[in-house]
Image (tube, rainbow, N blue to C red):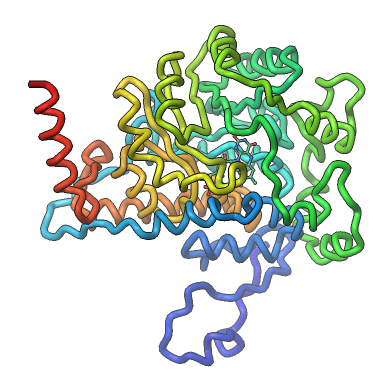
Amino acid sequence: MTGRVIPAELRPQAAFPGRPALCYPIDVTTPETAPMKHMTCIEDLRIAARRRVPRAFFDYADSGSYSEETFRANREDLAHIKLRQRVLVDVSGRSTATTILGQKVSAPFALAPIGLAGMQHGDGEILAAKAANEAGIPFTLSTMSICSIEDVAAATRKPFWFQLYVIKDRGFSKDILSRAAEAKCSALVLTVDLQVLGQRHRDIKNGMTVPPEIKLSNIIDVATKPAWAWSILKGKRKTFGNLAGHVKGMENVNSLAAWIGGQFDPALSWKDVEWIKNIWPGKLIIKGILDEEDAKTAVKLGADAIVVSNHGGRQLDGAPSSISALPRVAQAVGSDTEVLFDGGIRTGADIMRALALGARSCLIGRAYIYGLGAGGQAGVAKAIDILKKEFDVTMALTGVNKVSEIGPQVLVGGAAKKKAAAVKRKKAAE
Ligand SMILES: Cc1cc2nc3c(=O)[nH]c(=O)nc-3n(C[C@H](O)[C@H](O)[C@H](O)COP(=O)(O)O)c2cc1C
């Protein structure tokens, strides 16, 4: 069923004749998903998700830790990087296709691991994985997902990536890695920036705590979100799918959440990375690197790729934005290790900025989660499509035909920097 678009005369922007509306207000009484036709940008999907998803879950995705300085900086610093407009370059043969860790992809990005994605929409992880499959990009399943590894493997045909949090119970970590290998996950994303949990004030205020706080306002909120409630009711699971049945005596969401809370391991160290490297048979991507020294250690320990990331501004508040850390980290990493980037990407131009500053590809977090909340699989497909088309147009208008051609020269002032770096390299070699 599709939603009804509010007639033009009833739209608030009719008060500003002649001005194009950025996003049309849409009647969201439709039980399944918001109509995607008028979603023109990621912000439209965010607005639709805010209307459809209960506040506690929307805020869980939409916030950062503490004062949210790093969360805001991720977006602000990206927006300050200016792209260099080029004209009269033949870009008729351009393509957004490239590879990530040897895998052919239709565009230089993958979907990031997102805990509790299945609470933005029932079966959320399965739907996101399907959308990613159809778009020809990788999907990453979080350890803290609602759908399990086996659920996603059974519902999809292409291999996906699995993200691991190494917790105190190393037996559990070993077991879940065997399950991921069994499910033929093509890469392991090892997240290393969450030994302790950064606090998100809005989660506490909304009762997203352990145990969850049942508040009257939440009950009323859910009652006004029937489309969401219906999708969750229909969904296969309502708890942490990767943990239920695999942790003794912990079956319901409360006991599992309490177990997880006590399982983050402040003693985690590089030795654990060595251990993982020894037991995981496939590609290893280390996620959560913001410092050059850490990047070099990751390379030394044999990481196939690293993700320059501050967890979307959800962990160390006051840390630099991911984009400001990217050039230094990318330079510290040799060409044998791929550099992925995440944090604040909401447009195709942002992907271009990250590639220009040394990333080989990107992970997309909230941008697709808004799509999921707004419209399930169609919403994720829309988010991917928006980013891909924007990236394609950005390539054309910066005069680029291939992803591999992208470098600092697509940025204002970047060509001079590229030349200076080449001269420096030449001098160093002499
Ligand atoms: C709601 C939410 C849940 C997340 N859960 C995880 C997780 O389970 N594992 C992980 O490695 N990163 C997790 N992240 C971080 C993302 O993988 C990614 O680094 C971040 O979202 C990128 O920033 P962006 O959302 O601005 O694109 C989460 C992020 C959000 C917003």
Indicate which quadrant contains ligand 1.
Answer: top right
* Residue at image point 33% right, 49% down: 353
* Foreground residue among 63 and 290: 290
Residue 79 position (above or below residue 293) = below
Residue 81 appears at what percent x and percent y? 33, 56
Residue 424 appears at what percent x and percent y? 14, 33
Residue 354's quadrant in the figure? top left
Residue 325 appears at what percent x and percent y? 40, 41
Residue 94 appears at what percent x and percent y? 23, 46
Residue 248 horizontal side relative to residue 285, left or right:
right
Extreme residue in the left direction: 430
* Residue at image point 63% right, 42% down: 127
Q: Specify the quadrant that holds the C terminus.
A: top left
* Residue at image point 60% right, 28% down: 163
Residue 404 horizontal side relative to residue 222, left or right:
left
Residue 233 position (above or below residue 244) = below
* Residue at image point 47% right, 56% down: 75
Residue 323 position (above or below residue 140) = below
